[in-house]
Image (cartoon, rainbow, N blue to C red):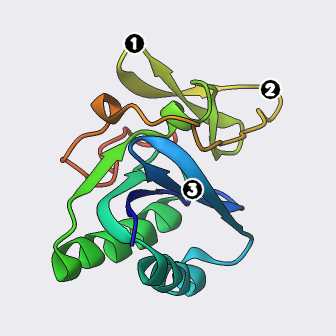
Amino acid sequence: MPKVDLLFITLTSPILIGVYKEGKLIQSVVSQEKSSDVLPLLFKELQAKYTIEKLLYANGPGSFMAIKVAYVFLKSMSILKKIPLYATDAFYFNNNQPIKAIGKLHFVKVASEIKTQKFESAQEVNFRLPDMLDLNEFSTDAAPLYKIGAVGQ
């Protein structure tokens, strides 16, 4: 079986999963289903087809529940299957565009700091799987980005 890395972007619908061989995207999986329902099924399918070397994911900002579900699932698989887990922030996957928080507030990344900023109109968020992964953008500190200041600021 080919050795690959799996990348999960579960912050919004659709869920995106990229299969990467030597850093190059070789397969994309897109699902409109809830991450809590579909992640175990998709993982099982991919594990039957590939030898998974690394798990990577977008650890926020975004939907608190989506981040939590992805983290708990991927951390569990990391421990159970002995596969290292890595994370990076979601701005890596949307060209550093604002990400919806609540109401008119959006998360923005200024330099290396994530803050909230008010926009009068909703900013469209489109995440994409990169054609090539830059593993230097990922960290073994894969905990969700819960330390972002209060959204109501």
Q: Position of residue 34 (x, y in %)?
A: 64, 78
**Figure quadrant of residue 135:** top left
Which residue is at 41% across, 42% downward?
A: 150
Q: Residue furthest right?
A: 121
82 displayed left or right of 142: left
Local secondary structure at mark 3: loop
In the rendered image of this protein, does residue 3 appear above or below residue 26? Answer: below
Amino acid residing under circle 2? Glu
The foreground one among 97 and 28 is: 28
Give the alpha-carbon distance from disc 2 to disc 1, as whole Å: 23 Å
The foreground one among 77 and 28 is: 28
117 displayed left or right of 75: right
Indicate the quadrant containing the N terminus: top left, top right, bottom left or bottom right. Answer: bottom left
Q: Position of residue 124 (x, y in %)?
A: 78, 36
In the rendered image of this protein, does residue 127 appear above or below residue 118? Answer: below
- Which mark sits nearer the N-terminus, 1 or 3? 3
**Figure quadrant of residue 101:** top right
In the rendered image of this protein, does residue 61 appear above or below residue 35? Answer: above
- Which mark sits nearer the N-terminus, 2 or 1? 1
Number of on-image labels: 3
Residue located beneath label 3 in the image: 11
Give the alpha-carbon distance from disc 3 to disc 2, as whole Å: 22 Å
Residue located beneath label 1 in the image: 111
Amino acid residing under circle 3? Leu
Amino acid residing under circle 1? Ala
Which residue is at 57% across, 24% downward?
A: 96
Local secondary structure at mark 2: loop
